[in-house]
Amino acid sequence: MRVSLKLLITPLFVHFDNVVIVEDDYRRFYPLSLSTPISDLIIGGLRYYEHIILWLINAGLDPAIYVVTRDYLSRLWNGIAPSLLSRAGVKYSIKYLRSIDEVNGPSLIIHTSLLPHIDTLNKLATNFNAGEVRCGDRVLIGLGGTVGGNVIHNCDLPMIEGVWSIIKWNTYLLRENSKYLIKVLGDKSVDSEVSGSSVIDERGGAVIMVGASVEPLSYIKGPALLGPGSRVLPHAYIREGSVLYMYNAVGGEVKNSVMDMHSLKEHFSYLGDSYVGRWVNIGAGSVTSNLKNTIGIIRYAGVETGLIKLGSVIGDWAKVGINTSIMSGKYVGQGSSVIGLIRTNVPPFRICINDDCREYMLDKVVEVYRRFSRLRGVGVNESEIALMRAVYEVSLHETPL
């Protein structure tokens, strides 16, 4: 990594040549984990590994960065999803591997169960005299190759238990790490246009804009992040925790939700406490329920999340038709197309009217992606199609949790 900025240097008392990010419990992130390494899921405005990069920049370090993920993702992921930091001019390299044994030299190993809260990482690193930090049997952070090092047991650290934890921690992490992102960017607003009739309310946190546009009569409440090529359409209400990562267009109301690149929600509708993958379109009038009528705890794929507010998890390449309502805590799998009242989880590659679902052929999903990319004025990415085909094969036998 190279940044031509004068940054705060935090002294670290740990020597390592590499940082290795290891994904934990990937099935607890189903269906998102079928098509995205856990390291590349977005939380707090950035992909997980981008927070690690921000931390390393702050510490004045430039190690090699590796991600250990599943075999097919290690082979196919490069070239799929650019990062906001790279678009903002931060230079770094990252390599995806299928085994930690492929890494040579002293390594700091960070597991994705650990929330990438930069102040927490600073505290851990400046007081790091252990081989590793654990919560029970779960390793959170450690030094690779350490023999006989102390083990610290700490279950009070903020942790990511599953996809629902992304929603739980999203607003908090965006607020907490924003000062480090602003320092790297040089300003809260970079190459962005904001209509004079729009309202930017930063009483709850910064509104960060990078190559974005905010159109007339919209209201944005921080903390929020609008990434490169993203548009907030007229009369939109963008609430705290909203992340438009890259090339999104959004109208209506959004609250504590993540939208990955090239996904659209252009019309009046509600997206709350939800995660939306890449290349998703949400039709006019569609709603993600994020609260049960009983105000009870929401379960996700049978797991008690501890959350009373949890919306939808919508996988890459999915399409949500007009006037569709998705019940709280439900997912829509990769490539699926849904319309109506969705009361149950939708596996990948299904077409559903209400809860009546049948198989949605892979070739049709690929063709819809090609049409959508042309509609968006973006060239078709053959690497995306190769990943789509691999995900289809994996989805035939992979089950959640």
Image (spheres, rainbow, N blue to C red):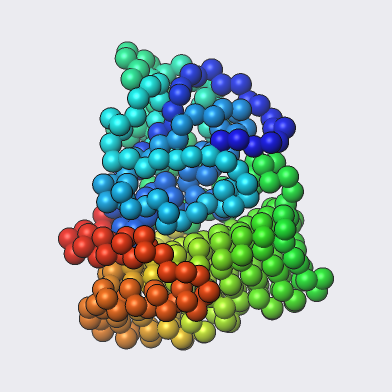
Query: With respect to residue 295, does 133 lie above or below?
Result: above
Q: Quadrant of the C terminus?
A: bottom left
In depth, the one of 117 and 48 nearer the eye is 48
Query: With respect to residue 186, does 344 lie above or below?
Result: below
- In the rendering, at what x and y percent does residue 275 appear? 46, 63
Looking at the image, residue 87 sits to the left or right of residue 137; the answer is: right
Q: Residue sitting at 68 percent across and 46 percent down?
A: 185
Query: With respect to residue 98, does 390 lie above or below?
Result: below
- In the rendering, at what x and y percent does residue 129 appear? 46, 16
Q: Residue sitting at 42 percent across and 18 percent down?
A: 130
Query: How many badges with numbers are in the image?
Result: 0
Query: With respect to residue 266, does 142 lie above or below?
Result: above
Q: Is residue 349 visible?
A: yes
- In the rendering, at what x and y percent does residue 203 appear? 74, 56
Q: Is residue 172 visible?
A: no
In depth, the one of 234 and 310 nearer the eye is 234
In depth, the one of 57 and 253 nearer the eye is 57
Looking at the image, residue 67 sits to the left or right of residue 251; the answer is: left
Looking at the image, residue 127 sits to the left or right of residue 225; the answer is: left
In the image as oriented, which residue stretches furthest toward the right? Answer: 196
- In the rendering, at what x and y percent does residue 279 appear? 44, 69
Q: Residue sitting at 27 percent across and 65 percent down?
A: 389
Q: Quadrant of the N terminus?
A: top right
Occupied quadrant, residue 21 = top left
Q: Residue sitting at 61 percent across and 28 percent down?
A: 60
